[in-house]
Image (tube, helix red, strand yellow):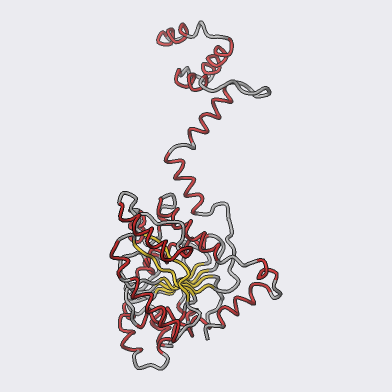
Amino acid sequence: MPDNETPLVAADADLGSDDADVVAAEESMGQPDRVSRETVMSFPPPPPGNSGPLDSAAAAVSRETFDTPIAREAMRAVQVRNVRNEVWPKPVATRIITVANQKGGVGKTTTAVNLAVALAHHGLSVLLIDLDPQGNASTAMGVAHHAGTPSVYDVLLGSSSLQDVAIPVEAAPGLRCVPATIDLAGADIELASQVAREHRLRKAISGYEPQADYILIDCPPALGLLTLNALVAGKEILIPIQCEYYALEGLAQLLNTVELVRTQLNATLDVSTVLLTMYDSRTRLADQVADEVRQHFGAKVIRSVIPRNVRVSEAPGYGQTVMTYDAGSRGAVSYLEAARELAERGRPSPAEQDRPGGSSEHHNEGQGTQE
C-alpha cells in the first residue's frame, strides 16, 4: 500500500465491523475516500434484507443528485417537453381565442406563441394566426414572413384560404401558423371600402380544414380593423396584463370595445381569460396590480403568473419560443401551467362527453357558428 495511505488505514483501525466493511469495500473499488465514507455512515442502518451501508450510500447519492439546481431544471424541462406524452383534454368545440390588449409590450405575442406550443405538445391541434403586421409571432414560430409570402393578408383580401397559407411548425407537431407580413400594415385602408370588412377573418375560420382544437389569434397593439376582425371571429378573449400601473389604464377602453362588439357584431364574445405577465416579485407594485386584477376579474384570472424572465425575451432571437429554447426556465414552466389551466377550463363536462355524435360533431358545430 502506498505510504500516503498509511494514516488513513491507521485511523480506521479502531472502527467497528460495519465500518471496516465500508472501508474494505471502498478500498476494493480503488476509492479510499473519507468523504464518501462519512456520507455512508451519516445514514441510518438499512432495514433487514438490504445489502448493507453501500445501498444507503447509493440512495443518498441519488437523492443528492436530484436535489440540485441543475437536476431540478432538468426535471422541469422533461415536464415542459412532455417526454411522458401526457395528453390534455380536447374541447367539445373549437375554441377560438383572441389574444388582445391595445397596449403594447404587455406580452400578447409571447403569450400566444407559448400557449400554442404548450397545447400542441400535449396532443392538441392548434392553429396560430398572426394578425400583427410586425410578424413577431411568425418569427417565434420560425416561419418565413418576408414581403410577398402568402399570409393572412391574402386571406383577408379573399385571394387565399387559411389552409392555403397555414404552415406546419417544426417545433411542435399539430401546430400550424398563419404568418403575417408587412403587407398587412395597409390592410386597414384596403379593407375600408369592402363590404362586411369586419367579418373577413370570421368567414375564413368557418371554412378552415382540418378542424383545430384551438385557434389562437395574435392581435396588433391597437383597436383598429385588424383587431376588430379578431374580436368578431373569436368566441373568447384572453387579455394579457402586465403587472404595472400603466397596463391598467387602457384596460377600460378595451373592455368598452369588447362590449360594443358583443352588442353589435358578435354576441358570443366573452372575456374568458386574464393572464398576469411580467410579474416582478421584488416590487410591491406587482402584487398590488395582481390583487386589483383578481378583484375585478375573479376566477377569469389564471392562477399561474408569468414572471419576468430573460429566457422568454431571448427565445425569439433564435426563432423559438421559450418552451423549446429553455424548457427548464421559470418562464417556460409558468407558461406550461397557464396552458394546462386553459385546457382544463375547456374540458368537456360529463354530459357533453356522453352526448351522441362524439367530439367531431361538436367541432363542426363550433366552427359553423362563425358563419
* Res. 139 image quadrant: bottom left
User: Where residue 339 appears, x then y in whole percent?
Assistant: 49, 61
Task: Find residue 183 and report its horizontal and vertical position in percent.
Answer: 32, 81
User: For this view, does 41 lie left or right of residue 293?
Assistant: right
Residue 99, quarter of the rendered image: bottom left
Could you say which is closer to the camera, residue 270 or residue 355? 270
Q: Quadrant of residue 70?
A: top left
As rendered, which of 174 and 76 lies closer to the eye? 76
How many numbered marks are there?
Answer: 0
* Left or right for 29, reference 274: right
Residue at (59, 63) in percent of width and height: 89
- The location of residue 220, given as percent across then percent down, is 34, 74
Q: Image height check: is 25 above or below 257?
A: above
166 and 205: which is toward the camera:
205
Q: 213 or 34: nearer the eye? A: 213
Residue beneath the point at 32% across and 78% down: 147
Q: Is residue 101 left or right of residue 61?
A: left
- Side (left or right) of 253 relative to 2: left
182 relative to 140, above or below: below
- Residue 347, image x, y percentages: 59, 65
In the rendered view, tell whether residue 323 sits above or below residue 359: above
Q: Residue furthest left?
A: 246
